[in-house]
Image (cartoon, rainbow, N blue to C red):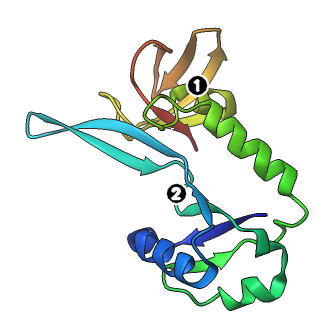
Amino acid sequence: MWAVAKIKKSEFEMFKRELINKAGADIKFYCPKIEYHRYFKNKVKRLEKFALENYIFCYHENFNKSIFLNKLRFIKGLEYFLDGHYQNQSEIVNFIKYCKGAENKKGYLTQAFFKAIITKKAKFISGPLTNMFFEIIEKQKNKLKILVGSVVTTVSDNNNYLYRPV
């Protein structure tokens, strides 16, 4: 059964080790990531970021037992397990399949994943407009017509600019 855990990002590796120690080696983790590039002092650095910020999916057969989850509540790096994972297993499984279908060969989410869920406003993660917010005027097949400040422009799917919903 899948469970969704909110973790402390700085203690991610510690959380995984502690959970494996307490639950056993048969636990699975899934955390969708994005890869992007930033310029630092005339050099391009490759960075990665969790797509769901500080949430991670964990799978173990015993997650359907509340006693088992209560034993895991105080492991290092864990803030809490989200309630309702019993009732929402099909949605969790469908979301994980959707994420895995939108991954590239390296295992990072592509921009197609975000384009499908963006409705009105978004923020650039990479490219020359990094950290700028924009509004979507029109969605087209291979591009978005957007409003950045007072400038209307078009962002093609072919470029490597990443953006995420706000």
Which residue appears at 49% of the width and 85% of the height?
A: 76
Q: Is residue 163 above or below residue 145?
A: below
- The residue positioned 46% from the left and 76% from the top of the image is 17
The vertical placement of 26 against 159, above or below, is: below
Q: Which residue is mark 2?
A: 53
The percent coordinates of residue 86 (x first, y second) are 87, 67
Q: In the picture, residue 61 is in which quadrant? A: bottom right
Q: Quadrant of the C terminus?
A: top right
Q: Quadrant of the N terminus?
A: bottom right
Report the side of 27 relative to 82 (left or right): left
Say left or right for 23 vs 38: right
SS of the residue at dot 1?
A: helix
Disc 1: which residue: 112
- Pointers 1 and 2 in contact (CB under 8 A)? no
| x 53%, y 63%: residue | 54
Residue that extends furthest to the right in the rendered view of this protein = 87
Q: Could you tell me the amino acid type at mark 2?
A: Glu
Residue at coordinates 60% horizontally, 70% vertically from top-left? 6
